[in-house]
Structures are given as C-alpha cells and as structure tokens.
C-alpha cells in the first residue's frame, strides 16, 4: 500500500511511553494499542512530522538496520495502523475493539428480569439479549431476592439502529456498547458503583483475585486459561476470595471485592470436588456454548475491605507440561491485559491511562504454567513470603 511521504494520523489519538514501548489511545473508538520499542520509535518519528525517508534514516542509525529493512518495518507498521483506522486519511476502522470479545447472538429472547440483593443493595436487571441474560443471571442467581423491593432498575435495550446496546439505569441511558461481552462488563461495573458509591474506579479487568492478609493477587487470562479454577482452589485453601470474572481496581490501586460465585467449567469439577462437594449436585449452566457450574461465596465476603494489588499473575493450565513460573515485563503484562479484556473508562481519558500505567509498573507480573494445583499454590505462597521477608526477589527455585 502506498502512503504519503509525510503520513498524518487521526486527531483523536494520544500516545504514552511505557516500559520501553508505547501505548496509543484512540479517544474515538475507546481502544488502546501497545507497541514495542521499534514500533514506538516509528510512531514517535512520524507523529513528530518526519517524512518516511527521514524516519528511515533515523531507524537505520538507531537500530543498525539497512535502508531496506527500515523501510520494510515502517511499511508494515503503517499498514497495521491503517487497518486499525489510526491513519488520518484512512476510512478503514477497527472491526473489533480490543476490549470486545463477542458479537451479540442473533437468537431471540423474550425480555427476562431478575431481582438481586447484595450487601443491602437491591436492584433489578432486565434484558432481551440471550447472551447477556445467560451470563448475568447465572452469575447472580445465588444473590436472587424475589421479595426485595429494588432500589435501582437496570435495563438493556437495543438502540434505534439496532447496531448497539444501551444500558439504562432508572430509565436514564448510562452508556452504549457494541457487544454482549461489553454489556456484561458494563452491568457488573454499574452494580459495583451502586454498591460502592464511595469508590472511584481506575480499571476493570477480566480475571479473578484472591488475597493473603493485605497482599492482593490478580489472576488474569482468557476464558479457559484456568484462572477461575485456581482462584477457587486457593480460596478453599485459606486465601481470601475477592472476585471472579471481573477484578475492580479503585483509583488508589486497591482490589475492591466482587465475590460473585466461582464460575467453573466442566474440566475442573472433578479436580475441585473434594474441596467443593456441592459441585456434584449443582445445576449445569450453558454459557457461550460451555457447561458451567457456579459455587457461591460466603455472603460476608461482600463486606471485606479492599486490598492493595501487589502481584499480577497470568495462569495457564497445561496438563502436558511441567510447571513454569516466569517474571515478565510491564509492557508484556499490558499487552496481555489489552488482548483479553480491560476497561479504563468510557470514554477513555489519558489521565486514567497514565494512572493505570504508573500502578502497573509497580506490580510484579508473572506467567504461571501449571498442571498441579498444589504446586501452583506452593509457588504463589513462596513468592508472597519472599516479598514480605526481603522485598521482591527472584522466583522460588
């Protein structure tokens, strides 16, 4: 693809340097993009108004590249940014938000309503979207309270053009999203805000979280990675259970409890049955084509105070490989979070992103490949103990 010698970028962008790379925010689409040092250098040079030829010369000197190699890198990045809709002259927009996971189902559901009670907050949720209904109603079923008079009414409706969904709170539109996955997150975010009106939010992350005393541990990963299984196991082994499916971080960097029932896929039922004997008789739910069972948390968990997020772990269950615990850079951790699901505001604001990046730089991040839950627990406990005794040290073993 041919680009002008001095490419222009759409005006609704901001960029921040982070851990040797660069983070680009799109205020129009509410998306974030993370790039490594080389891509960040290209972005910075072209954003400063250099021509492609001038940027090529700088790259050759800075990265010891030939002219052909430098031009190839620049052309590749411009092509990618054009596909994402970041180039000013492009009419192509990103087809899928980095925070969106699924499009709404085409199936039809008559509007369903549920009423729930969480720590004194009564609210109702109504929706005619089958994907939203299946997930939200299953997660909150243990908190259903048919006798409670709702304090607030949440409802999901289609916009006039039918392309988006709107969330209404007590009849007033709160926000619009493009997918069922985003709407599920928006509903949970809204309930959190209604429940904890004293908190201001920095980030909502797709994940689970537990704590040991004042040490909060954030477990993040795509669906099926094993994070919910690990969180349920650790909770039954003496860790304090904080949340599943969603981790809410306050502006102060605290994990605010969202102890909805553990969502457990079929593959984990037998593994956890000795710790949760009720699994055997629990109802099977079908969520996005997967069989799930939900194990309610103690009601008192809703009254637990928030704890500081001090570790970020990306678990991955793999029965065919030995355990591997590896520290990763903040830039790689951010890439993983954005590739899955993270909410930093709607609309996104540069100041919020800056605050989150500053916090992320302070949280040691690790990947944990495990096939044995007991070994995973032992390694996490040792990591916490080493941090407490000596500050952050190398990984155990």
Image (tube, rainbow, N blue to C red):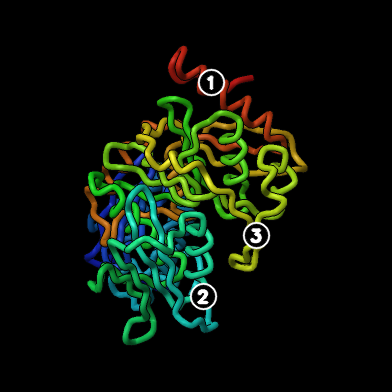
Q: Quadrant of residue 159?
A: bottom left
Position of residue 269 measured from the top left corner of the image (x, y, whole percent): 71, 49
For marks 3 and 1 on the same chain, the one whose residue lies earlier in the sequence: 3
Between 61 and 104, the residue placed more toward the observer is 104
Q: Look at mark 1 in the image and give the residue it sits on.
A: 394
Q: Are marks 1 and 2 in contact (CB under 8 Å)?
A: no
Task: Answer few, some or many: residues within 10 Å of disc 2's Cα (few below 14, many 20 plus, some between 14 and 19).
Answer: many
Is 267 left or right of 252, judged from the image as shown? right
Instruction: Decide if residue 371 is in sight here.
Output: yes
- Please identify, in this view, whether the residue under mark 1 or under mark 2 is nearer the observer: 2
Residue 318 drawn at (x, y percent): 71, 44
For mark 2, give the secondary structure.
Answer: helix
CB within 8 Å, label 3 to label 1: no
Rate crowding at label 3 as few (under 14), some (14 to 19) or many (20 or more) other CA atoms within 10 Å.
few
Q: Which residue is mark 2?
A: 130
Which residue is at 39% across, 82% downward? 163
Left or right? Give the position of 245 relative to 378.
left
**From what the image shows, is residue 287 above or below residue 19?**
below
The residue that disc 3 covers is: 283
Residue ID at (32%, 63%): 150
Helix, strand or loop under label 1: loop
Q: Is residue 209 left or right of residue 276?
A: left
- Residue most toward the right? 320
Q: Which quarter of the rendered picture does the C terminus lie within?
A: top right
Marks 3/1: CA distance?
43 Å
- Label 1, label 2: how far apart the Cα atoms are: 47 Å
Residue at 22%, 65% (x, y): give it.
11
């Amino acid at each position: 693809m041919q680009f002008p010698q001095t490419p222009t970028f759409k005006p609704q962008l901001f960029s921040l340097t982070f851990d040797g790379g660069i983070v680009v925010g799109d205020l129009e689409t509410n998306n974030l993009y993370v790039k490594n040092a080389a891509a960040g250098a290209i972005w910075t040079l072209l954003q400063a108004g250099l021509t492609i030829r001038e940027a090529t010369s700088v790259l050759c000197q800075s990265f010891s590249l030939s002219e052909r190699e430098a031009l190839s890198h620049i052309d590749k990045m411009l092509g990618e940014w054009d596909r994402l809709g970041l180039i000013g002259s492009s009419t192509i927009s990103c087809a899928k938000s980095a925070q969106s996971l699924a499009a709404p189902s085409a199936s039809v559901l008559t509007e369903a309503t549920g009423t729930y009670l969480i720590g004194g907050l009564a609210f109702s949720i109504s929706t005619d979207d089958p994907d939203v209904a299946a997930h939200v109603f299953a997660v909150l079923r243990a908190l259903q309270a048919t006798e409670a008079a709702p304090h607030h009414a949440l409802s999901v409706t289609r916009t006039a053009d039918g392309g988006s969904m709107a969330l209404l709170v007590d009849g007033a539109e709160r926000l619009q999203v493009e997918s069922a996955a985003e709407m599920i997150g928006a509903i949970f975010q809204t309930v959190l805000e209604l429940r904890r009106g004293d908190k201001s939010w920095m980030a909502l992350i797709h994940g689970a979280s537990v704590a040991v005393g004042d040490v909060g541990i954030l477990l993040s990963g795509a669906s099926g990675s094993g994070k919910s299984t690990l969180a349920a196991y650790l909770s039954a082994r003496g860790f304090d259970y904080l949340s599943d499916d969603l981790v809410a971080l306050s502006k102060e960097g605290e994990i605010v409890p969202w102890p909805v029932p553990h969502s457990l896929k079929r593959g984990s039922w037998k593994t956890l049955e000795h710790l949760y004997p009720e699994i055997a008789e629990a109802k099977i739910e079908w969520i996005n084509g997967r069989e799930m069972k939900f194990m309610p948390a103690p009601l008192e968990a809703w009254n637990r105070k928030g704890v500081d997020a001090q570790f970020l772990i990306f678990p991955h269950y793999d029965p065919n490989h030995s355990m591997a615990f590896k520290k990763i850079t903040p830039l790689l951790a951010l890439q993983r979070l954005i590739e899955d699901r993270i909410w930093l505001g709607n609309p996104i604001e540069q100041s919020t992103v800056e605050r989150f990046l500053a916090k992320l730089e302070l949280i040691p991040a690790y990947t944990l490949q495990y096939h044995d839950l007991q070994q995973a627990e032992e390694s996490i406990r040792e990591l916490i103990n080493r941090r407490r005794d000596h500050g952050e040290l190398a990984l155990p073993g």
